Image (spheres, rainbow, N blue to C red):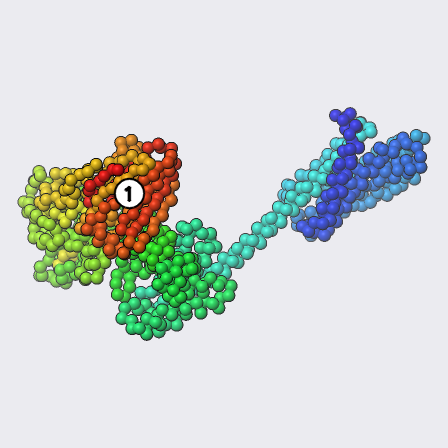
Amino acid sequence: MRDFIAAHQLNIMLMMGSICGTTALFSAVSNVLSRRRKMVMIGMEISAMLLLFSDRFAYIYRGRMGSLAIVMTRLSNFLVYSTTIGVVYFVNQYIEDLCVNEGGDESVPELLLFTDRCALLAQILVVISQFTGLYYTFDATNHYVRSQGFIISYLLPVVIAIIQLYVLLQYTDRLSRRVLIPLILFSVTPLIAGGLQIVFYGLSLTNMTMVGEIIVVYIFTLMDTNERLAQAHEIEMDNLRKEKMSMKRLFDEAAKAFVAAIERKDTFLQGHSSRIADIARTLAKQSGKSEEECDRVYYSALLHDIGLILLPDSLVGKAQGLNDMDYKLVKKTPVFSEEILSSIKEYPYLSESARHSYERYDGKGYPDGLSGEDIPEISRIIAVARAYDAMVSKRRYRDPLPMQVVREELIKGSGTQFDSRYSDLMVQLIDTENAANEAEGQQLDLEKEIRCGTYREKITAGIPIMNDESIIRFRCEPDPENSGSYSTPSLIIFDAFDRHVHDNRKSIEANHYLEYGEVWFDGHGITTAARNMDVTEIAAGPRDANVYTGARNSSVNGMRESGMYEILCGRYEDHLKLRMKGPYKTVDVIVALPNKSMASYIALTGENCRIFDIDVKTTFRKVGMGDIPRIAEEISYIDRIEADIPNIQVDRTRSVATEGIEVKDGLEIKFHSRSLPTASLVWECPYMVLFYSDDRKVRGRGYREYALIKLNGENDNRDEYAENRFSVKRTAEFEGWDRWKQSNKDGLVYDVYFAKKRDKVTLMAENYGIHIKNITHIRDGRKKVYAAITGDQVALTDIRVL
């Protein structure tokens, strides 16, 4: 190692000296250092550079004769001793700066001031040595020779290094380790190297070690400075973010307060704009927009109806009974909104989106009749959000619409009233929420107590009668305000989208309300829309062995004493059965529903009574075939000649499906479809399923679903095992959704075509003006893919595989 250093130390000195000169230049042009620290770093690096260059020249010219060589050896050796002290001095200045700034001292420590004086004394001794030969002399051959006082040249630098090390150790808890460690090494390693240099004469170990540490100090100082700058930048950015959030909150609160003040003109409008803004933000986020873009959508939606402030109070929220003048004035709302918001120059999109938020995608909106992509995107999002909130909110002239109706209206308006991209997203959000509610077992919004005066004055929400057997228990007592009057509880059996009983024409139509009948605990019953109802009184005592069992341990006599009532209910296909146990008798009720498709609910009501402690529990027992005696014939719409695949009747959403048909290139499936009489929604039509299972059955062994295509032009994405690209177009043959639904009621032949190439399956279908194309890329590596037909409330017959 000694020989290697001796052979290459001149090159090492040149390289390290050049690095120091470069870093001195970098320090000079840097803007990240304070002026004092910049000067200290420059002095440190230049001193280190001169030290190594001087030492290098001293080695180069030693032993040479001639006037230049004599001058260079003496000048170089002088600079070696002088710049060594210079390096130590500037390092001391750097430590002083650290102590005052990063260390937090008000003044420089006295020990460091003492080392400054030691450095000055050392420099004076170097000058004196040039005249007295105190440290070194030169022989006749121009070689450097150490004098007896040479060791003195080490004393003061060693004292300075020890003091610096002591001071640094006092600041370990206040200085960054990234700065502290190189400085400690600078104080220690040259001392070790100096000891080695005394032994290995002829090697500049001390100087090279010292300069190497100077380079390390520079690098770590730069890293520490950058880290501090980054922290300062982050603090500044955090302050800016907080200020921005504060301004945003201020703007948000001011906007909401202003909108709320406007909406106070009509009770039914209160909160409308805020809800629209929340829905619009959700749609924007679901479409993949950034947080900033979502904020733009949110505030545009929040303020889009601000022009209502310029309308007369009598017109705000009024949707019916408008004359031509009133309607013209109401249609100016988006123009008023634009005029008000145009004063906010910083956000021009607010006024633009407000003006066009009432445009329709087909160009039939107002005020400018824009269509398609010419309508600003934010306005297209607002249109969907506003329509959704208007439908699900209570209005002066109607109750909230059922979610089924809302969903259908969004589908109907897709591509005409709305941008299909955002109306489809809204439908997906509705479906996702419904699926989450089903998965979690949606809680019944059921009253715990009602007080009835006249019959049906108060009615609970509907309790679903499912295939899982349920028990409904409640207590009932006469209403003390009507003592002496006839008092009894009763049940209403019905179907409605919103699970509530309705008695006015508009809500009956909107919620597709159908009442099957009414039953009293004394065995009296009224049949309304049910095909048949059988009420049988059962004597108190042992139960009839033919009645399906549930909770069997309740005592009829105990009910008589406590006023307790119990209903044991369950359903199998189109029949339901109730066992009604009251204080005086037990009654069995069997009801034949119009068909298997319709839902069924029980609502509690009564006359001159208080019904309380209402509780519903499920027994988790399935009602099976034979548990309920049939009192009406099964209704079938598939009693027709079968073709290649057996006919099926789908009474509820995907309740049954055909067997799987292997998809091969050129496959064609042709079938006849007819919507069931109770079908009323656009998605109650045939569906195509692409899947794989070991037994070729939908939901069979090893089932994997790749695509679900509803032939009304909807798709239910299945992304776990496949990637789908879906498109739908309405041709000139499409005459509107009402006509399309009627065609499906009358019966319609569907043709579905398949193309298959390796892992890509293309499905194409066109029916009554709806052209569908879906490309499915299978991602799980399955070679075989099957297609099956299912649907919702449809009879599928004459199924041919071509």
Q: Left or right? Give the position of 28 relative to 712.
A: right
Q: Compare residues 141 and 382 and report the one nearer the observer.
A: 382
Where is residue 256, by image quadrant? bottom left
* x and y, in percent, of residue 650 in the image: 21, 43
Where is residue 423, by image quadrant? bottom left
Q: Quadrant of the N terminus?
A: top right
Q: Left or right? Give the position of 551 relative to 4.
A: left
Q: Residue at x 27, y 51 (%)?
A: 768
Q: Left or right? Give the position of 578 relative to 94.
A: left
What amino acid does circle 1 point to? Val
Whether residue 350 can be seen here: yes
- Above or below residue 253? Residue 199 is above
Which residue is under mark 1?
A: 752
* x and y, in percent, of residue 138 in the image: 91, 33
Q: Quadrant of the C terminus?
A: top left
Q: Residue at x 71, y 46 (%)?
A: 26
